[in-house]
Amino acid sequence: MSLYQKIINREEKISLVGLGYVGMPIAVAFAKKADVIGFDLNREKIEAYQSGIDPTKEVGDEAVAKTPVHFTSDPAELKQAKFHIVAVPTPINQDKTPDLDPVESASHIVGQNLTKGSIVVYESTVYPGVTEDVCVPILEQESGLKCGTDFKIGYSPERINPGDKVHRLENIRKIVSGMDEEALEEIANVYELVIEAGVHRASSIKVAEAAKVVENSQRDINIAFINELAMAFDRMGIDTNEVIDAMNTKWNALGFRPGLVGGHCIGVDPYYFIYEAEKLGYHSRLISAGRQINDDMSVFVGDQIIKQMVLAGKAVRSSKVVFFGATFKENCPDVRNSKVLEIVQYIQEFGIRPVLVDPEADAREIERAYRYVLSDEKDAGSADCIVLAVAHDAYKQRSLAQWDAFFKDLPAGEKVIIDIKAILNAKEVREAGYTYWRL
């Protein structure tokens, strides 16, 4: 009997190693079809899930409270599973090289608890070759088992879009791969239990690893192109969003907008490609240039905040600048690699007093990772400048009058609005006399 058949008969279990923005939705989805062990080293996170609280907001408290997933921080419980899915983060180091510590650590833990007949599938974003060349030796060393004989491996890149309530795990086609045909079929069959959109069988693990990196590099390059236009159009006195609105009337326009590129995928994955390509003697020109442009946007926006305050006749030093939004994208609590926080750090060098407000953001993570404390909106008043940094739905619904309430009692021209996400009606704001700039 196949492992897939044993799983649907509930004779064998699935484990999820890493219960963040990716692993948690997968665990909850599979638990509707099979017995699932949800493992994470973070005991605080496990206790939250056990209490029916979803800090990621990806599946919601109610779904977490009802799910039959067995949450644990005890690695030994992984021995009860035969199909392991590793969904830990793969960040970058300060020098922009891949940080494989989380995926290597997860491999050690899985290897120590691996049993014969198991399949290990990695979802963590890596450069081509990591699964077979880095992870397999660790699994073999820790388990004393032989890959291909005693256990098998595969790779299925995650495609979850944090905060997106339309494109969900179930309705996004899943890439799957395996070390051989038998492993591929087992892995495809298991994922088809929850992926309504179906799966794409990649020809090899390396192809699947490369596909994930390329997906995000492609988006990064397209956004970099628009960001470069935005910086040039700013000097020309042209509104970039108006140009894009005009361009988008053509059927084949791509629809990208200028913005800050943070988060754990688009702002990170291209560096994995660049690293591996350069190891093999190829210098990536286009992808490297795109990364540089997008990384520079924090300074560009920071300079615009200062410039607009000077044009409004304000003393920059000790000015109160309120940032509405601190997450890397709208409608999610994820603050990893947030470029908003980089802007805050930059303008502080000029003596500005920043205030951070975000009802969606993970306040504890902001304090832990960035040493900033989120403020309540009641502390956001008497501002010299407000920065609409993230397009949360709650922010998009506000009127200009509601935003005006956060300013000091000043003439409109001395009230500075920086609209990074083009939330407001530019014509209305300018006609009202505000000092207004948008990316």
Image: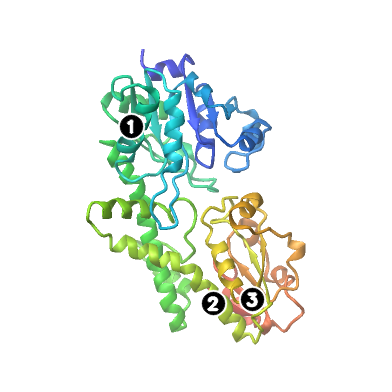
**Residue marked by disc 1:** 137
User: What amino acid type is highlighted by mark number 2?
Assistant: Gln
Q: Mark 1 touching mark 3, by CB under 8 A? A: no
Q: Marks 1/2: CA distance?
A: 50 Å
Residue 311 in the image, given as x and y percentages of width and height: 59, 86
State left or right for residue 247 relative to residue 320: left
Labels 1 and 3: the sequence-earlier one = 1
Q: Marks 1/3: CA distance?
A: 51 Å
Point 50% across, 68% down: residue: 298
**Residue marked by disc 2:** 304
Q: Using the image, determine if residue 371 lies above or below residue 110.
A: below
User: Which residue is at the front of the view, 99 or 24?
Assistant: 99
Q: Residues within 10 Å of mark 2 (few under 14, many from 20)?
A: some
Point 56% across, 34% down: residue: 41
Mark sitting on residue 437: none
Provide the secondary structure element on which disc 3 rests.
loop
